[in-house]
Amino acid sequence: MAYLEVNKISIRFGGLTAIDKFDFKVEKGQIVSIIGPNGAGKTTVFNILSGIYRAAEGEITFDGRNLKDKSPQEIVSLGMARTFQNIRLFYDMRVIENVLIGTHIRTGYRFLDGLFRTKRFHLEEGEKIRYAADLLKTVGLEKRIHDYADNLPYGEQRKLEIARAIATGARLLLLDEPAAGMNPQESEELRQFILQLKNQGYTILLIEHDMNVVMNLSDYIYVLDYGKKIAEGKPQEILENQQVVAAYLGEGEVE
Amino acid sequence: MEKIRTGINRLTEGFSYLETNVYKYRIILYAGGLSLSMLLPVFGFSQYMTRIFIMIGIYTMLALGLNILTGYTGLVSLGHGGFFAIGAYTTAILMLRFQMNFLIAVMIAMVFTGICGLLLGLPTLRLTGTYLSIVTLGFGEIVRMVIMNFDTVTNGTLGIRNIPRPSFFGFELTLANHGLFYLMLVLLILVTYVCIGIQNSNMGRTLRAIKADELAAVMMGIRSSRYKVGAFVVSAVLTGLAGGYYASLVSYIDHNSFTFDVSIMILSIVILGGMGTIRGMFLGAAILVAFPEVARPLMEWRFVVYGLVLILMMRFKPQGLLGWRSRLPYKIPVLKRSQTYREEKEANRRGR
Amino acid sequence: MILQQIFNGLSLGMAYALIAVGYSLVFGILRLVNFSHGAVYAFGAHAVIFFIGYHFGLIPAILLGVLLTGALGVLIDRVALYPLRKKKSPGISSLITTIGISYIIQNLLMMGFGSEKKPFPKLFDNRIVHILGARISTMQIIMFVTSVILLAILTFLIKGTKIGLAMRAVEQNEKNAGLMGINTNFIIAFTFFLGGISAAIASVLISGYYEILYPTMGFMVGLKAFAAAVLGGIGVLHGAIVGGLVIGVSEGLAATWFGSQYRDSVAFIILIIVLIVRPAGLFGRKGIEKV
């Protein structure tokens, strides 16, 4: 069984079927991309995976566990975390505090420990802060630790968002258009960064429009259009797929 | 207008500069501030002055309580007068009817206020923003209506008279012997300590994250509804404590002591001082409580001034007078004995 | 007796609806609960009594007072809320600002007119009509009829005129409406103006009905009207009308059944139940948050 296996999920908003019997799987250690034109339902898939929406039909298995009726918190604690299409950092907080929020789910001490500053509180809090600082170092934000999140340039905000997701202890990262709004140089840096994550053993599910990033990174690609899967395959196969080209360029039905 | 803005900004800049530079001496400053306030009565102030200081202390506690909800979590409560009333009435009734000691009465009152906070917090699971504020406003008014109509317990519109002063081992605390002042000081330090604890721990960080972006916080695995309800409870408990002390201080309470005006006053303090700061609550309370006393001729203008405070602050300085972003580096503790928590636990177990 | 309370409730409820429309219109466009609306309502009656005091005559005094209140609505938007919009402040800032405004208006009224209750002149020679055994005063009938007419005019204004179309466009999407050449700031100011005059008219009607006015009168009535707006689905015009009627009738019934001291609690209880059970109200649509 694959690491993440999604079996025929569907979701409807009013009369509109936003996702129609979509299935895909992600093997451990892979980078898998979901691509498709705007409004194809890619982010909706992420919202279902992360527990914001509930699929009307279909099954999702992650790491051998069924995700049906799991709350977002349970899903995070199982080891899946996400980023957002339009970056959603805690802008009024410091960079390191953003990462510390990521470690929230692994906090063992209780409210009263914090209130009375018990030994447990000091040790665990110290451990978390050092972990966060180390993590920021590995993603190359060590100079930014004390800054406030909204003072970071765009590319670093993306990195911070990914670091925050990693801090939850997740092994599967859902990245929603990480290269959006980046110039070629920034997106190249991002590509390196994601590759580095893969080498560290993270599994990555990617939504992306930047074809340079998608084609150079992905082990496998799924193409979504109007909520339906229209193609899947290795990057090369996707590039040669007539239906995909049609969907992207907006030609009529391909005979 | 431009002048107001630059004026306020310069003031804050100054404070912020101070923070960065006097940080090393903070222990001395805290100790100095504390001993100064402890010596206040010795300077021989009149009972009138002592009373003002005490009121500043009470409103600081109230603001610290509301700050947890509005400052950290971003939930605007317009009904904290209700919690204040519940704390005061519960304490008064327990002391009068059951001859309870002040401390025990206040503790029970805090628990009871906390339960009310829990009940009021539950709607937060479904409501956001303004809607929530309206429900809290409704809560405050309903509390007043219950007080007015539930005669058998609250004595209705007549109010409760002759609430005893707190006494310990037969020693009664009064304004004259400064006992009430020192009791206020102790409670205020306690409340401040609790607030600092929340601010510096996971709880405070989590609440701020929920304020900044609740959805993103949920996606980080935070059970936001649990924390929001928790914030309500803590906030209510602290407000209830202030209420209990207030009842014992004034010894007469009725439904008019806890109007919407009180809720707005608390909110104004939080906003003037700086939402999400602890220092701000002290300054905000000092300014707004002392203002009508200092500016006697402006007494009848004071509510207009509270309104202006809200509007001007929102326009020119939404983060409040003392609400700047700290320039001090984030404290990263160094590993003392090159041990992590788990290792230490291991070591302890093996050692014993 | 119950029939009597229902008739009382219907006439009062119609006036509540008139105030509720003010909440609804502003909320529809700005997603803001205009807390100052209750104070604006109180200002209306006081402005009228001020002009009556200067011997303007009843009708001119009412007209002037109503227009002045409309202007106050515009002033609130221009002076306090517009700068916040320009700065793109978070919603909480506008909310707190409107609380501040209501506070200022209410307390200025207290300082100008005194905080005690004052008589409001009889608007009409009151006669009692008996319908099905219930006593109905001409004032109640006039209150009901005037409110219905005004609400009809408002509905026509919004559904059937060019400026109404622009209002609805701004409500849908302020930015795009602006790009289409609609002067959004004018539309918002106009909305505040409408809210102001309808509140002022309701204020005159209700004060005329009770023959009394006082500076804090807007607090409770404002909350009831807000409850009405929420019950019907805030932002929905006909919802406000239904909500107003329900609140008006149920508070009359509560006063009969449980005693008059519970009259004011009903609106709160309805409000809280609606907000918890169905925050979108009876006719409101549920929004989906975009992630």
Image (tube, rainbow, N blue to C red):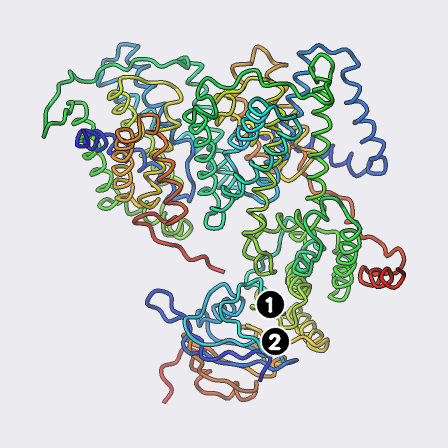
**Protein chain holding label 2:** A
**Protein chain holding label 1:** A
Q: Earlier in the sequence, mark 1 or mark 2?
A: 1
Which residue is drawn at the image coordinates 33% and 23% (left, top)? C44
Q: Determine whether, in the image, residue A35 is placed left or right of residue C67.
A: right
Q: Quadrant of residue B283?
A: top right
Which residue is drawn at the image coordinates 54% and 81% (left, top)? A25
Q: Determine whether, in the image, residue C256 is placed left or right of residue A125.
A: left
Which residue is drawn at the image coordinates 43% and 27% (left, top)? B150
Question: Are the residues under marks 1 and 2 on the same chain?
Answer: yes
**Which structural element holds mark 2?**
helix
Residue C79 appears at what percent x and percent y?
46, 31
Which part of the image, by quadrant, shows the N terminus of chain C?
top left
- The three-letter amino acid code for the residue at tag 2 is Val
- Taking depth in this image into account, of C171 and B232 the one nearest to the observer is B232
- Taking depth in this image into account, of B1 and A157 the one nearest to the observer is A157
**Residue picked out by circle 2:** A213
- The three-letter amino acid code for the residue at tag 1 is Pro
Question: Does B247 sit above or below residue C265?
Answer: above
- Are the residues tagged 1 and 2 within 8 Å (C-beta)? yes
Residue C222 appears at what percent x and percent y?
37, 31
**Which structural element holds mark 1?**
loop
Q: Any mark on residue C4, and which?
A: none
- Taking depth in this image into account, of B235 and C73 the one nearest to the observer is B235
